[in-house]
Amino acid sequence: MSGDRVELTFCDKSIYETGILTSKNFPILKNNRLLKAAKGETPDKLPIWIMRQAGRYLPEFKELRKKHGFFEICQEPYLACNVTLMPIKRFDFDAAIIFCDILVIPQALKMIVEMGDKGPYFPEPLTLENIHKLDSEGAISRLDYVGKAITLTRHKLEGAVPLFGFSGAPWTLMAFMIEGGGSKTLSKAKKWLYAHKKESHNLLKLLTDVIIDYFVMQVEAGAQILQLFDTSAEYLNKSLYTIYGLPYLKRIREEVRDKLKKNNLEDVPIVLFAKGASFCLEDQAKLGYEILGVDWTVNIEEMKRDANVTYQGNLDPCALYAPKEDLERYVNDMIKKFGVHRYIVNLGHGIYPDMDIAAVQTFIDTVHNVKVI
Ligand code: CP3
């Protein structure tokens, strides 16, 4: 990061009285490594951020979670802002990602989502019988708190790094809504794809429409880049993903671009992270996304790259458990394979909650020590 790094400060509720939530007069961006890599330009150093960087491996996050519920933090902009800032204050990451969750969309569709010991769950999962209760009317205004958190965070970042907005992809949201929580097979959700095709497409279309408007709202609020998480893509094969995944992903990229233009907003790059869908990376490259996230199972030497796309990934999250020298070697080897152009360094999935802070520091330092120019 550049030498003129400022000390970022946390905020409390009184910040709302300053009128900051309505001001779009954002500070100038100082670190544009990530946005440069997204455009195919060469930054001074390789950009790095990590999925779930604002989470439970941080002692300060665990401390805050003792006092506040998970969705309470998501819904209270000053808390979401403070958690987003935590990893940026501690490390030289080249991007921040707004603290939230992909399941806030089903919540905004009026499904109940609760946080249990093993993660979020739906006490009443989606069925063919209760699907009519999904209410997309006004869903974006029910997600207004995400926009507020983004606007506030964009100010509080003081231009240190760009801010990511994000959403779950249609299939991943559909899968969670039907399964009601974690599942080893997703057989309930996949049953719809084989036995209830029309209902599946109706649901995916409804989710796609909401995601498009949610992304536009996030950019309007101040998000400088977006990531679409299709974490459950790994449960589908190429033929299912060609029918139930790719067409909706294409619509999202195209319609976000169109709507931003219509609203006189600048287009922003979007990362598509279709975990476990390396069976169709070449098809993904044709959807219009500027960046493709690559999960940790992909062998970069065998991957066919598209010259117009930037790639992001893909260190095995467990590699951070390795001794320092081994970790440095894994990171340097990965960068040798990806090369320094059109590349954003990340893990190949989210960081684990028991990860040592020192390993994250080693990861970042190793990346920033690589000579780019
Ligand atoms: O730092 C960041 O990346 C921003 C915040 C973020 C969270 N969830 C916070 C979170 C992001 C980008 C997500 C995305 C998300 N949420 C995904 C896609 C990415 C992925 O990891 O696959 C998915 C599938 C979810 C749904 C979800 N939320 C699950 C399955 C779980 C439980 C498993 C787990 O990792 O804990 C969550 C909970 C969650 N989301 C936590 C955090 C910090 C931990 C919950 C807690 O604090 O008690």
Image (cartoon, rainbow, N blue to C red):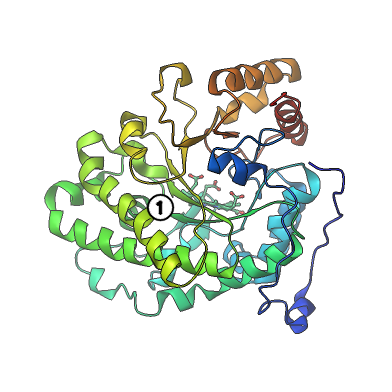
Q: Position of residue 18 (x, y in %)?
A: 77, 81
Q: Image point 24% across, 48% down: which residue?
A: 244
- The quarter in which the C terminus is drawn is top right
Res 245 seen here:
no
- The quarter in which the N terminus is drawn is top right
Q: Position of residue 139 (x, y in %)?
A: 41, 75
Q: Position of residue 117 (x, y in %)?
A: 55, 52
Drawn side of residue 226 relative to residue 84, left or right:
left
Q: What residue does disc 1 label?
A: 181
Classed neighbour count for the residue bearing mark 1: other residues with Cα under 10 Å, few (<14), some (14–19), many (≥20)? some
Q: Position of residue 77 (x, y in %)?
A: 65, 70
Q: Image point 58% across, 61% down: which residue?
A: 223
Q: Is residue 194 above or below residue 283?
A: below
Image quadrant in which you'd find residue 308? top left
Q: Is residue 78 above or below residue 158?
A: below
Image quadrant in which you'd find residue 173? bottom left
Q: What amino acid is labelled 1 in the image?
A: Gly
